[in-house]
Image (cartoon, helix red, strand yellow):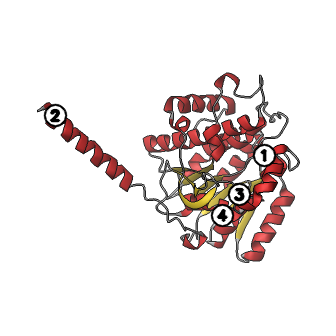
C-alpha cells in the first residue's frame, strides 16, 4: 500500500512538473525583430539607450510603434541617438530624459518627472551598465560604482516607478544580467569592495545581484498581485562600448576582446533576448533569456542557464533588505 501511495505521489509530482514546463514556452530559436508584435500605444523606458544594446532596443521598439523614452547621462549623446533613430524611423515617438544611475538624487528626480507626466509605464528596460573599471570608483552616494550603476540605481528606479507600471495592462520590467553572473557571489561582508577590489569580481557581483533581484521582484509581484512580469535577460557577448569604457581596449582583457571580437555577435543580436522579454506574449515572468550556443556567448535565443546562486531565496531576501536600506526605496 505504501509503495502504491509513493508511486501515485511520484506520478502527481511528474504531472505537476509537466504542467509547469508546459507553461514555459521556449522562444523560437530564430526569433527576430520581425516577430515583434506591434507596440503601438505602449510606453517604454530604456536606460542607457544612447549606444550599444540600449540603442538597439530603442530603435526596434520605436520601429514597432512604441513611445520610447531614452534615459542616460549625456544629453548630447541622447540627442544624437534620437536623431539617428528618426533617420531610420521618421515617425518615431522619442524622448530623452537625463539620469545618472550612480546618483540616487538623479534617479529620484527622473522618477518624479515621469510619475508627474506619464499616464502609465508599460515596459521598463534596465539596460545601462559599466564593466570592470580598473580602479575602484564610488557613486555620489558612496557605493562601489559598478554595484551602484548596474544594480542599486536600477533597484531604486524600478521601485519608484512601480505605481506607474501598475497602471499598465501588461507591465514588464526587463533587467539585464550577464554570463558573468555565473562567476559571481554577493559578498555581504564587503559588498562595496572596500577591503578588496577586483574589477571583474565586482562586475560579476553586480550582475548576479540583478538576477537575484529580478526573480525576487516576480515573487513580490505575484504575492502582491501587481501584474508585473519581471524578466531577466543577458546578451551573451556582443560588440559594444562596454570594454572601451571599462577595462579599456589596451588592457589584457581588451586585447583578448579585440582578438576574438569577430567571433562575437552584434549589439543588435545581443538585444534580441531583451526585446523578446519586453514584447513577446509568450515571455514568462520570472524567466531568464539569452543566447543558447557557444557557452551562451551567442547563438539561438532560448532560456538561459540560471546559476544556482541566483535562486537562493534567503540570499535574495537579504539582498533586497540591504538594497532598501542603502537606497531608501521601498516597493509599494
Q: Position of residue 45 (x, y in %)?
A: 66, 57
| Mark found first going from the N terminus, 3 or 4 | 3
Residue 94 occupies quadrant: bottom right
- Say few, some or many: other residues with alpha carbon within 10 Å of mark 2 (under 14 / 14 to 19 / 20 or more): few
**Mark number, residue 100:** 1
Against 107, is 3 above or below?
above
- Identify the residue position indicated by label 2 in the image: 3
**Mark number, residue 238:** 3
In this rendering, the label closer to the viewer, 1 or 2: 2
The span from disc 1 to disc 4 (Cα, nearest Å) is 26 Å
* Contact? badges 3 and 4 (CB < 8 Å): yes
Q: Position of residue 33 (x, y in %)?
A: 60, 70
- Taking the view exactly as shown, the residue that stands out farthest to the bottom is 90
- Comparing 128 with 17, the one in front is 17
- In which quadrant is the C terminus drawn? top right
- Say few, some or many: other residues with alpha carbon within 10 Å of mark 3 (under 14 / 14 to 19 / 20 or more): many
- Say few, some or many: other residues with alpha carbon within 10 Å of mark 1 (under 14 / 14 to 19 / 20 or more): many
Residue 86 occupies quadrant: bottom right
| Mark found first going from the N terminus, 2 or 4 | 2
Residue at left offset 62%, top offset 45%: 158
Is 117 left, or right, of 249 in this rendering?
A: left
**Mark 2 element type:** helix
Q: Position of residue 311 (x, y in %)?
A: 51, 37
Residue at left offset 79%, top offset 64%: 81
- Taking the view exactly as shown, the residue that stands out farthest to the right is 250
The span from disc 2 to disc 4 (Cα, nearest Å) is 52 Å
The span from disc 2 to disc 3 (Cα, nearest Å) is 53 Å
- Residue 66 showing in the rendered view: yes
In this rendering, the label closer to the viewer, 2 or 4: 2
- Identify the residue position indicated by label 4 in the image: 269
| Mark found first going from the N terminus, 3 or 1 | 1
Amino acid at each position: 500500500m505504501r509503495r502504491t501511495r509513493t508511486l501515485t505521489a511520484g506520478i502527481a509530482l511528474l504531472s505537476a512538473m509537466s504542467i509547469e514546463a508546459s507553461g514555459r514556452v521556449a522562444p523560437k530559436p530564430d526569433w527576430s525583430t520581425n516577430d515583434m508584435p506591434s507596440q503601438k500605444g505602449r510606453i517604454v523606458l530604456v536606460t542607457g539607450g544612447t549606444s550599444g544594446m540600449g540603442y538597439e532596443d530603442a530603435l526596434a521598439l520605436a520601429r514597432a510603434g512604441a513611445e520610447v523614452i531614452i534615459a542616460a547621462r549625456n544629453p548630447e549623446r541622447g540627442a544624437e541617438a534620437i536623431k539617428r533613430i528618426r533617420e531610420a524611423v521618421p515617425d518615431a515617438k522619442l524622448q530623452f530624459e537625463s539620469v545618472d544611475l550612480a546618483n540616487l538624487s538623479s534617479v529620484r528626480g527622473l522618477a518624479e518627472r515621469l510619475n508627474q507626466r506619464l499616464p502609465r509605464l508599460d515596459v521598463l528596460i534596465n539596460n545601462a551598465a559599466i564593466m570592470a573599471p580598473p580602479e575602484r570608483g564610488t557613486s555620489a552616494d558612496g557605493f562601489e560604482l559598478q554595484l551602484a550603476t548596474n544594480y542599486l540605481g536600477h533597484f531604486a528606479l524600478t521601485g519608484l516607478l512601480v505605481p506607474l507600471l501598475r497602471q499598465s495592462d501588461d507591465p514588464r520590467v526587463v533587467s539585464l544580467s550577464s554570463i558573468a553572473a555565473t562567476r559571481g557571489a554577493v559578498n555581504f561582508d564587503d559588498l562595496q569592495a572596500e577591503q578588496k577590489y577586483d574589477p571583474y569580481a565586482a562586475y560579476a557581483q553586480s550582475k548576479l545581484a540583478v538576477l537575484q533581484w529580478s526573480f525576487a521582484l516576480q515573487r513580490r509581484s505575484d504575492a502582491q498581485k501587481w501584474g508585473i512580469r519581471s524578466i531577466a535577460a543577458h546578451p551573451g557577448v556582443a560588440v559594444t562600448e562596454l570594454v572601451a569604457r571599462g577595462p579599456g581596449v589596451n588592457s589584457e582583457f581588451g586585447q583578448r576582446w579585440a582578438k576574438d571580437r569577430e567571433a562575437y555577435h552584434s549589439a543588435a543580436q545581443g538585444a534580441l533576448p531583451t526585446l523578446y522579454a519586453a514584447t513577446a506574449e509568450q515571455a514568462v515572468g520570472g524567466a531568464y533569456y539569452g543566447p543558447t550556443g557557444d557557452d551562451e556567448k551567442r547563438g539561438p535565443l532560448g532560456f538561459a542557464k540560471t546559476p544556482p546562486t541566483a535562486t537562493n531565496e534567503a540570499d535574495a531576501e537579504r539582498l533586497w533588505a540591504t538594497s532598501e536600506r542603502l537606497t531608501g526605496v521601498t516597493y509599494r
